[in-house]
Image (spheres, grey):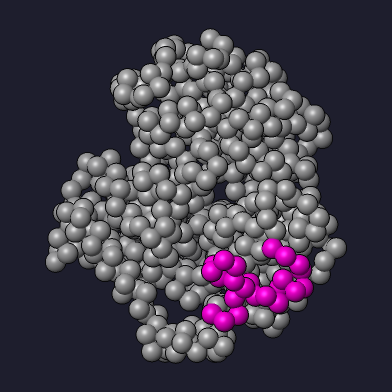
Amino acid sequence: MALTILGLSGALTHDPSAALYIDGKLVAAAEEERFVRDKHAKNRMPYEAAKFCLQFAGIKPSDVDAVAIPFAPISLGEKARWHYAKRYWYAPDRSLDAIFAGNRRFYRYKKRIEWCLTQLGFDLKKIEIVPVEHHLAHAASAYHCSGFHEKTAILGIDGKGEYATTFFGYGENGKIHKIKEFYDPDSLGGLYGAITEFLGFEMLDGEYKVMGMAPYGDPNKYDFSRLAKFENGELLINTDYANVIGIRRYKENGKGFYFSPKLIEWLGPKRVGDIADDPYIHYAASMQKLFEDLSLQMIDYYLGDILRETGKLAFSGGGALNVKLNQKIIARPELKELFVQPASGDAGTAVGAAAYVSVERGVPVEKMEHVYLGPSYSNEDVIAACARHPAQPQWQKINDVPQEIAKILANGNPVAWFQGRMEFGPRALGGRSILGCPSVPGVADRINEQIKFRERWRPFCPSMLDTVGPQMLGSDHPAPFMTFTFEVAPGWKERVPEVVHEDGTSRAQVLKREFNPRYYDLMQQLENLTGNGVVLNTSLNRRGEPMICSPTDALNMFYGSDLEYLVMEDVLVVKQCGKQA
């Protein structure tokens, strides 16, 4: 009998997702936001995502052996709840709640999962729901999917799960061992999120904008060391300024923030608008530096010995999407390979919880080599969507998609590219992408103004052939998921200026052909035409919207932008105003 485990996340009321393992193979995984068209799908359950996973695998609810959820009850006998109560003494209602009703959120979440499973047709008397601690799910998503066989250091950094905010451990022989956890409010991820709010962005959504802004500032202009310190193996966040709740919150128009009025007194008013200017660019740079410095100190303290022994590190949690920190980790002499789970945020905990339960039941899971795990659509589906669409798109079928599209790109036109299965995780990796030719001056600005409507200082990233990666990045470290930045090698900034950031780095995807042959072939065609096997790649969506899932979503987005070319499988749609291909 096959072992079938369904993982369902959404415990923290954002980023619900579903993942399905059958006999250790990750068959399908998707985020709810893509189906319901609501970014982060806050306060929803992963109903559509789970429905897709089951349908894709052609199985019924009765075929599922267990449902894994990345949230678990935390015993009063452990430190976590006491730590929370003590550190939040100034909000006594929350403190007492942690001690007397500290698992209330877990039971509420479990009820919602049961409701969701009932809607999907599960019999609650027959299905086992297995809770996995949130940080253990993050750790499992990194370690079990890394494919590492040696002893592996495991790191988890995020806002918080049940109570834990940071996880240090190691994996050996398929087992995860916990070394140390820090607990709320002592959270580096939470601190980064609070400063993200102060810099005028939304927590959970704007952290990468702060990271994109940081290279424009001087990290030494302002000393942020008062916000957090790491001493004698303990992380301490200064809750006079950040990671605050209740009465300490700064409030504006009835909305409470995770920083205090004291932070405003120190740094001045909260940033508003889209302009990255003085002093906020320096604040972003200082926050990024503090995050990197403390993370590296903590890694050294708790994981240094393991890294010196085998050189392998698996990293997950929202903090693992900080590509600048990852660049610094890779630069450490003892590090041989870093694996960052591509959906490191909370969506990825559905994969982690399911992988953890599969391994516990004796079925190891395979290495995660790609994230093309969502729905795909046939030419017939695409043509039907065109026929139904109110814009009455003019379409044509083309024979050699890579060749035709490479020509359009080389002529300086951005193209919406919709091919194969949708990606799982926050990065477009050639399934649902907007592409541009990175040697064409101004193509990034054009994509920004016409399509993405996003802040100009945010970098655009390259996808490249595996034959080009080592030359352009000066490194043969695997980079399939855009989870690291690299210093761009001399000469390449001039060749592909549109995908090199202010600080001379690129957050790259280095692709092997076997995982996305059509996208690979496109880059080869582009190399024939321009001399560079590199393409500018950004996600197929407009600002504030989730990535596109279906052909109808793609058409809606296309007609809501100034894009002229959209290719879905073999079907090319060209706007009337545009030039014919």
x and y, in percent, of residue 527 in the image: 65, 20
Q: Which residues are magenta?
A: 246-270
- The answer to which image quadrant residue 64 occupies is bottom left
Q: Is residue 42 left or right of residue 409?
A: left
Q: Which residue is painted at 74% across and 41% down in the image?
A: 501
Q: Is residue 153 left or right of residue 379?
A: right
Q: Quadrant of the C terminus?
A: top right
> How many numbered marks does the figure carry?
0
Q: Which residue is painted at 69% across and 40% down in the image?
A: 456
x and y, in percent, of residue 309 in the image: 63, 65
Q: Is residue 439 left or right of residue 154?
A: right
- The answer to which image quadrant residue 259 occupies is bottom right
- Residue 427 or residue 221, whichever sits in front: 221
- Residue 52 or residue 328, whichever sits in front: 52
**Vertical side of 466 occupied by 49: above or below:** below
Q: Which residue is painted at 80% across and 29% down in the image?
A: 494
Q: Is residue 530 magenta?
A: no
